[in-house]
Image (cartoon, rainbow, N blue to C red):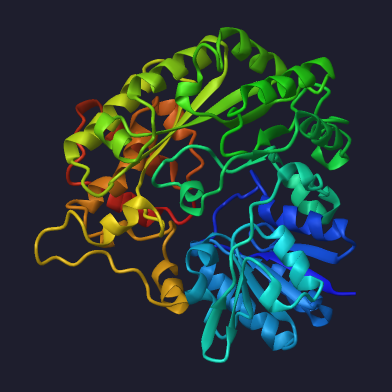
Amino acid sequence: MSKVLLINPAFNINKENYDSSISVGLLSIATYLDFYNIKVEIIDGVRQKNYLDLVKEKVKDCDYVGISVMTTQIPEALELSRLVKENNSDCQVIWGGPHPSFFIKQTASHFLIDMVCYGEGELTMLDIVNGKSLNDIKGIAYQSGDEVIINQPRELHDPAQMPLFNWELVPKEILENLHLIPSLTSRGCPHRCTFCINAILKNHWRTRTAEQVLEDIRIIKNKEYFSAKGETSPFQGGKAKKLRFWDENFFVDIKRAKQIINGMIEEDLITPWETTVRANYLREGMIDEEFIKKLKESGCYLLSFGAESGCPRILKKIKKDIMPEDVINSAKMCLKYGIIPQYSFMAGLPGETRSEVMETLELIDELVKLGDQIQILGPQAFRPYPGSELYKECLTAGLPRGKAGWQEPGSLDQWGETVKDELNYLDVSKFPWLDNPGFIESLEAYVRFGAHSIKSAMGSTIKVNKLLKLFFVLLCQLRWKLKFFRLPWDYKLAKRFVTKT
């Protein structure tokens, strides 16, 4: 019988804490293989400190190693692939995940990689492991001589036909330290945001049934390792571990959402939970006053919104299909019923002016004045994903005459070098469409430490000397009050003292 090892490699720069989540994609693939009696194990390089030793041990009698790769995991994933080949040259190395799905041919042509699994991986991995002819497997790419063969894509899966997560496949130490328990109730998104991976990969919205979601919560309820310390179950009051519906958009089918929420209340499955939602869903006929009361009753404590921008022109450009007033309305409704509203923003899109960025900061200012409970993420610098409508614009359009566009790395090794020492996907300072990349890069810090109260800013998890932190916070508070963000010398200085985030 074939043995499969699924690995989530470490990122290029380690962070303090990844316990808020797990690799849901690998768990789903592992669950599917296990359902068909394939021997499978998960190793998580992000959350298991000794994971390279585990790989060396486990790979010796392994037939297939599947590695899930985001762009900032490439340096570690390449070293991991080399390690696998050194310890078992017969083991097939298969890369999947976002980066290989964006750069199929480039990834499949690397000498350390036997195959690329692009798109959703459950059915594809099962075909590979069962020894199906490569010519007949949808959703893979591989080298044949000097040529890279890219087979036709596989149809998107129906989540209702997939088994619920088998938590026993996740290393126990990870589950015990988990802060947010994921429940994946749907895949994809029906909306058209031009920067989003779902729009690029055409991942249309598909769901589990309400009863499947409730069964998943029942299973979680009975797992001892999901209990908070001192509790026998995360559903029995006290400091329960939190649940996250790990969907791109949980509320698309409002009838299904109501069935889930009503089921949680009626079956005593009430627990602290959070999820994502669009700002314009908080309206009559969708998430209205009556339904938001039910959300709170069922345990909802936080709703996460992609606000993106405070500028109507930019919102139209990225096809977000919301307006700033939708964001304000959603915040007021959440606060009225004791639910934390969390908003993510971005800045630095091609063609975005400084005054348009300031419109985003003005919206953030309006939000934080509504209440201390409001959480702001960003504005993070916009980073282009290949295949998006904005990607070509980043390469060519909107640049001064004679100035070259952004040049994407030409090989997997070049990608590894590009992101080797970068905390994020790409280095903002090298984006030619930005006149002042330092301004864009510093905004997240100025909002994080300047827009909120000093007490809140000092409570940040950034590890640095308290006096230095206080000094920086006070400077950020002054900058925010004056709305003066030029010459970000303090931000550049602060970066030197912070080695972990």
Q: Is residue 69 left or right of residue 329?
A: right
Where is residue 384 shown, x and y percent of the image?
Answer: 37, 55
Q: Is residue 397 visible?
A: yes
Q: Residue furthest left?
A: 401
Q: Is residue 7 left or right of residue 14?
A: right
Whether residue 50 is visible here, answered yes or no, is no
Q: Residue at x 73, y 60 (%)?
A: 123
Residue 226 vertical position relative to residue 144 in the rendered view, above or below: above
Q: Which residue is drawn at the image coordinates 71% and 67% (left, top)?
A: 51
Whether residue 376 is situated above or below residue 413 in the rendered picture: above
* Residue 471 position (above or below residue 278): below
Q: Say which residue appears at 73% left-offset and 86% top-offset.
A: 87
Left or right: where 279 falls relative to 108 = left
> Looking at the image, which residue is at 25% across and 49% down?
350
Relative to the observer, which residue lies in front, 459 or 311?
A: 311
The quarter of the picture where residue 467 lies is top left
Q: Nearer the viewer, residue 257 or 356?
A: 257
Which of the image's four quarters has the N terminus?
bottom right
**Above or below, comparing residue 216 to residue 103 in the picture:** above
Give the mark count: 0
- Could you tell me residue 205's position as x and y percent? 59, 40
Task: Quadrant for residue 188, please give it.
Answer: top right
Tell which residue pokes out farthest to the bottom in this image: 145
Residue 140 placement (x, y as % from top left)? 62, 70
Q: Position of residue 247 (x, y in %)?
A: 61, 38
In-front residue for pair 334/406: 406
Which of the 4 image quarters holds residue 444? top left
Comparing 428 with 259, the one in front is 259
